[in-house]
Structures are given as structure tokens and as C-alpha cells.
Amino acid sequence: MLHIAAMCKLPTASAEFEIIMTPQDFLRVLLTTAPEIYRTIRTGAQWEVVAHSIISNALLEKTGRMPIREQRYANFTGVPNNDSCDLVLQDGSQSIWVEAKVEGAHTRGQFASLSGQRVTDLNAAINADAAKLSLLRPNLFTFSTPDGKQSEPIQLTKWILVIAWSPGAAATVHSVSGPNIICDISTGIAFWIGVV
């Protein structure tokens, strides 16, 4: 499950990251999306799918890799189910699975739950996504070496992303802290990343 604690307010300076993306690298990419996310929220539209697209395009621009949207868990858990992960970014050495919770444009302080219903209990929503991510089995992630003869393990990375825009929800997001969590509210949009 999610291990909670905080290292809030990481540096936002632009920096190239290593082949293996860290939560701090991901946060730097997210911070570049804040103006576009804010403009999208202001339209009042259902914006979670649009947020996924904005983040995907930013990741493509910064990493050269386009995330897969709505990747089914079934092939990677050994457990048949219909659940899918919001964003999956892969290369030859790392597979990053990201479940996103976004505050509703018309439902201030509410986030989508596992069933698609709006909930105000952010911890319950985070724990539901952490439970889905915990089903991923690292032994199902391998890649072939350049000679095509060996199968090497891929680093499996699992994150939960929370995006909040209202002051109350941003304060709630900022208050959920722990050693495996980073958070930034400097742009007016709260970006919270929890490592599962």
C-alpha cells in the first residue's frame, strides 16, 4: 500500500533527467502543464481525460515517449479484471504506471472514485488506486537485450497522481504527507505524487 509522508516543494528548475524517470522528474514535467490545465478547468468541461492528454503530450515532448492511456491491468497482474491504468510510460528499462485523481471542474473538492462516482474522501480514492497498482507483478515485466537472447527485468514504477485546483482541495492534497510523497502547489494547481 501507499507509504505516506512528505518532501513538499521540490525545486522546479528545468533539468534533463536520467533514463530512469524519478517522481521529481515527473513533477518537473507536470509543472510545465499547469497553465494549460488551469485554462482547461476554467472551461468547466469534464477535464480528467483532457488532463491525461495534456500530461501525455508534455511527456512526449520531454522524453520522446508517448504514454499509453487506459492500459488494461489484466495482462500484467495475473488476475483477470477489466480495470485499466490511466497512463503508462514505457521504455526498454522502465515501466511507469500512473493512476490519476483529478478534482472535478464542477464538483469542488471531489475526486473520481474507482467506480466513477465523485468522492470527497481523498484518502479512500488514493488507497483504491494503490490497491489496483499493488496487483502489478514485477516478474511479468521483462525486455530483450540488444542481442535478443536474454530477458532482463524492467524497473516497475507505480505512482498515484492527484491534481487539485480549488484552494480547499489543494490544502487537503498538500496535507497528505509522507516519505514517499512529493507535492507542489506553487503554480496554483496542486500536483501530488505518491509512490506505491
Image (cartoon, rainbow, N blue to C red):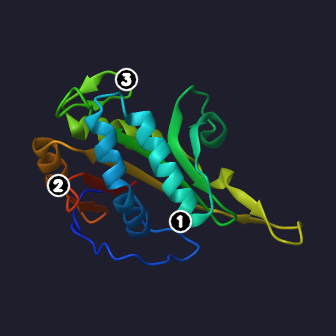
Which residue shows up at 49% across the image and 56% down it?
Answer: 58
Residue denoted by label 2: 174
Badge 1 crowding class, 10 Å Cα cut-off, few under 14, some 14 to 19, many 20 or more, is some
- Marks 2/1: CA–CA distance: 26 Å
- In the drawing, what numbered circle is on residue 116? 3
Q: Earlier in the sequence, mark 1 or mark 3?
A: 1
Q: How many marks?
A: 3
- Marks 2/3: CA–CA distance: 23 Å
Q: Classify 40 as above or below 55.
A: above
Residue 156 visible to an observer of this rendering: no
- Marks 1/3: CA–CA distance: 30 Å
Q: Position of residue 180 (x, y in %)?
A: 31, 63
Residue denoted by label 1: 62
Direction from residue 121 to residue 71 in the image, left or right? right
Please name which of the two marks, 2 or 1, marks the residue nearer to the observer: 1
- Whether residues under marks 2 and 3 lie with C-beta atoms below 8 angstroms apart, the answer is no
